[in-house]
Each structure stands twice: as C-alpha cells, then as structure tokens.
C-alpha cells in the first residue's frame, strides 16, 4: 500500500470565535483536544481521530506491527528506517519504512500506536474499540440481511424495498451500539417486528418477532 500521509495546510479554523481543527478526509470541524500541535499534520491526525466520516474510521482501524529494529546511534540511523516521536510522551522509536508503507500511516502516528506510555495506551484502547465496532456492525449487517430478507424480493421494486429496510435497520443498530438510543423496535410488516438492543456484554441483540393469529367469521 502506498503511504497515505494526511495533507493539511493549516492548523486552526476560526468557527464563530471558537478555534477548530479540520478533518483531512471530509473537512468537518473538530474541537482541539491538545493545547498545541507540532504541525498541521499533527492537528489533522487529532481531527481524524474524532471524526465520524467513513474515511476517518478506516484510518483509525489501520493496524501497526511491532517493530524489530537493531539499536542505533543518533548519528548512524539504519537505512530504510524512519525515527519518530510519540505524539503523547515524545519518546522516539525507529520504524521500518516498509511498515509505514503497509500501514499508510505517518511515522509519528505509527509510533503513537505502539508506544507504551499511559496516554498512548488510552489512545490504542480507543482504536481497538473502533475495530470492535466495525466488526460488530459487519456482523449486524450480515444478520439483518439474513434475518429480514424479503422472501419475494425477486423483482426490482422488491429488491429496492429490501435494501431500504435492511439499511434502516443497520442505521438503528449503529445508534443502539453507540448508546445514542436504548432500543429500536420496527414493524417490518403486520406479522414481523424487528427489535434491536444491547445485550449484557454491550454487544448487539437482534430479534425477529413473528405474530400468528387465527380468526373466524360466522
């Protein structure tokens, strides 16, 4: 993968008297979480760490490999190695250039994702939660597609209806997982209801409830 460094021309934007930083992927304004940044790249990465756009989420889920580089002197850095400082504690570590190319991260971001300082560990836990969310939402999509597939989805109109239903259920599943709503109950038809809520482990519980009835007119 070709290295994908974030390009940011400026650090702060004045938003109605409040200084904001810009997501480098979608341009959404975010609140600075540190008093100062080393450069525009540093600020852009902090904005990307907060933004909800798909590109920022994908960037947060990129993984790093633990580096195995021989010790080096400051005046004798090995070839094909880049040295960067953790954005939280400032400790420097060497990173093989090949690792950077595979991850698509800047050297500073890469080191921050492998540093063992307290702030970096908190950041890494947030990234791991992001990866768990992505995996959960993928499994939720597969479950919803299977559980609420329209049996008569053979013509174009039925296929579109199925896409709308499953798409809306997935959006609701995301809101439940993120704890923005407690529970979602949707009547799919007169006989089928979808119920989405969190289980005791903060995972998703998706139910398909069917109504059966008998009637007679005399």
Image (cartoon, rainbow, N blue to C red):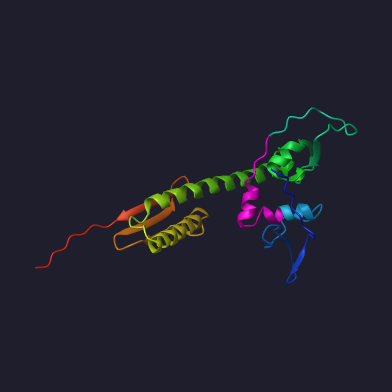
Q: Quadrant of residue 37?
A: bottom right
- Which residue shows up at 91% across the image and 33% down it? 75
**Foreground pick, 74 / 27:** 27
- Which residue shows up at 12% across the image and 67% down it? 217
Total residue callouts: 0
- The picture places residue 143, in percent across and down from the top left corner, at 42, 49
Q: Residue furthest bottom?
A: 16
Residue 115 can be seen, yes or no: no
Does residue 33 appear left or right of residue 143 in this picture? right
> Quadrant location of the C terminus?
bottom left
Looking at the image, residue 110 lies above or below residue 70:
below
Residue 150 can be seen, yes or no: yes
The residues colored magenta run 46-65
- The picture places residue 162, in percent across and down from the top left corner, at 40, 59
- The picture places residue 100, in percent across and down from the top left corner, at 73, 40
- Which residue shows up at 79% across the image and 27% down it? 70
**Foreground pick, 148 / 114:** 148
Q: Residue furthest top?
A: 70
Q: Quadrant of residue 132?
A: top right
């Amino acid at each position: 993968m070709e290295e994908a460094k974030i390009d940011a021309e400026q650090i702060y934007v004045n938003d109605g008297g409040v200084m904001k930083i810009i997501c480098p992927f979608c341009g959404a304004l975010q609140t600075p979480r540190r008093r100062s940044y080393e450069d525009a790249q540093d600020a852009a990465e902090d904005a990307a760490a907060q933004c909800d756009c798909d590109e920022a989420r994908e960037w947060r889920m990129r993984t790093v490999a633990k580096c195995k580089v021989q010790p080096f002197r400051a005046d004798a850095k090995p070839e094909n190695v880049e040295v960067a400082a953790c954005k939280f504690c400032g400790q420097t570590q060497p990173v093989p250039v090949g690792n950077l190319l595979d991850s698509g991260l800047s050297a500073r971001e890469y080191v921050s994702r492998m540093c063992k300082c307290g702030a970096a560990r908190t950041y890494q836990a947030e990234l791991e939660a992001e990866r768990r969310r992505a995996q959960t939402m993928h499994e939720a999509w597969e479950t919803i597609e299977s559980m609420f597939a329209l049996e008569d989805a053979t013509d174009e109109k039925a296929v579109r209806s199925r896409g709308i239903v499953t798409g809306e259920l997935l959006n609701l599943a995301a809101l439940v997982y993120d704890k923005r709503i407690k529970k979602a109950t949707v009547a799919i038809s007169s006989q089928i209801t979808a119920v989405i809520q969190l289980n005791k482990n903060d995972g998703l519980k998706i139910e398909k409830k069917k109504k059966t009835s008998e009637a007679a007119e005399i």
